[in-house]
Image (cartoon, rainbow, N blue to C red):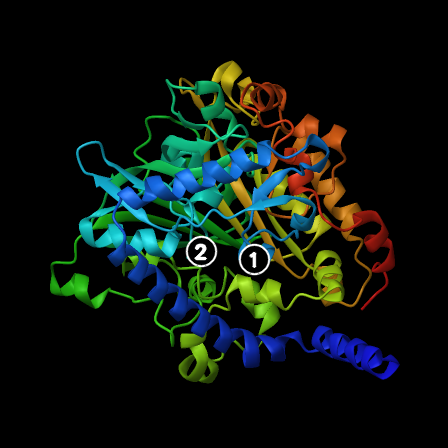
Amino acid sequence: MGLLTEWKKWAIRWMERNRGLIVVLFCLPASFVFDACLRLQKKLSRALESNDDHDRKVQRIQKQVAAWNKLPKEKRKPMCTARPNWLSLSLTFFQKNQCHKVPVSLYNILSLNKKEMTVRVEPMVTVAEITEYLVPKGYTLAVTLEIGDATLGGLAMGVGMTTHSHKAGLYQEGITAYDVVLGDGSLVRATATENEDLFRALPWSHGSLGFLVALELKLVKVKPYVKLNYVPVKGMADYCDMIRMVSGALDKDYPAPDYVEATIFSKQEAVIMTGEYTDCVTDDDKRKVNHITRWYKPWFYKHVESFLKKGKAQELIPLREYLLRHNRAIFWVVEDMIPFGNNPIFRFFFGWLLPPKPAFLKFTTTPGIRAMTFTKQVFQDIVLPMTELEKQIEINEKLFDAYPILVYPCRVYDHGPNSGQLRPPRPDQMVPGAKWGMFNDLGVYGVPGPVKRKEPFDAVKAMRAMEKFTRDVGGYSFLYADIFMDFKEFNQMFDLTLYEKVRKKYSASDAFPHLYDKVKPEIDVFKVGKEYINPL
């Protein structure tokens, strides 16, 4: 027994030291097979089932909730879905073993309403699947995340934004209806006019108010291609001003393009991209087409970086490829896992296996790897007012020195007293004459500069400073990532007034974990932070 225990410890240490090799030899092939099997299973399921089966599946969920309600009160544990932690995109490992798990196996696209410009889906439909379904028909979601494995229900209960968000707002603004099974087993529909309080509180609730069983999402009419302009800009003041201008942050009537994003490669260098829907009709158009998601192509952010030397350029990119442009490299996270991943030889022979499935990355995460990634890497998306863009970049360099960083402009609407967990933009953050403020996603992913230089990096201190800055300027942390706030600080960042009322009104208080308990790290951040503050 002792020999077996030592062997297991050695194996765990080896996995922690050689995770890149594990990703290449195990995660890439396994995730490819897993994805192929899952896609086949879903296709068979959709071929065999009718939309009537959706009602029967929802009724089974209701019966399970009703059975939970019949348990003696002392035996009732809060409910959660039975979906394994490693299948989610969240960085945390919520302790589902402490909950009563209910299977919510809802994977189908239910209907397309061209007249109302909406699509009705079950919550486990992924971004990859919905784009594959909609784009050939000439539509896309108003907000389409770049990661194919993200589920539409997960985004609805959490948050999402993309390069169309300067027009469409956060993901929640693109949802017209939620169908939810409540803690008492009843099925309710929430819209802007029906159960409005629940409708406003569901975004950012992370499954703490009920089981989502269907949702309806707004569509945007599109063309087959995106005409993408790459504009390299030198100087922080210049690229910040340009981002604000092209996104409409200075003038609500500014004719903003369909897509706006910026990748900042250093404090003084950025590439700003603007895109418009277009057809590909002329020979000149055809020469400009770039199939950026093909396996042998450079990772998108590396392609973007090349324009710092090349100068301004324009390309036509097939729409679905544009929407999933960051998928292969998971923005630039894969480079830290596979440093040679963008090598032309690796891309040519193995690029078709990318990206590694987040599910398998989590599946191979030992406690040591979890602690290492927690303390030696940064994975954060933060919603911040664009009026403070220069300060965002300054504090990123001071705390993390991590480049590149991502900037997506995004409208944040003021819905008044029913704004849900998001505190409305402050008056000085509102676009003049508009009902929204222009914010942006600051995406910081990868290994901080101090760690790359083999210097100490205090993850807890750095992230708590970033969270304080976020609270001070009226921003919000994405809750899929690790948070470092105590409950009081969390309540300062988010307004839980409506949320707490909704929990009581809709039978969630004893039936589901509290939002803070759902999203806080499963590890002791302060203890782990102290243990891992030493240099690598």
According to the image, label 1 marks what residue? 404
Residue 477, position as x, y percentages in the image: 61, 39
Of 209 and 315, which appears nearest the observer?
209
**In the picture shown, does residue 483 fall above or below 423?**
below
Residue 188 in view here: yes
Which element carries disc 2, helix, strand or loop?
A: loop
Which element carries disc 1, helix, strand or loop?
A: loop
Residue 268, position as x, y percentages in the image: 57, 53
Quadrant where the N terminus sits is bottom right
User: What residue is rendered at 37% in x and 17% in y?
Assistant: 193
Residue 459, position as x, y percentages in the image: 76, 52
The disc, 2 or 1, on the residue closer to the chain's N-terminal end is 2
Inspect the image, locate mark 2, and give the three-letter code of the amino acid beneath it: Ile
Residue 170 in view here: no
| Labels 2, 1: front one | 2
**In the picture shown, does residue 42 fall above or below 120?**
below
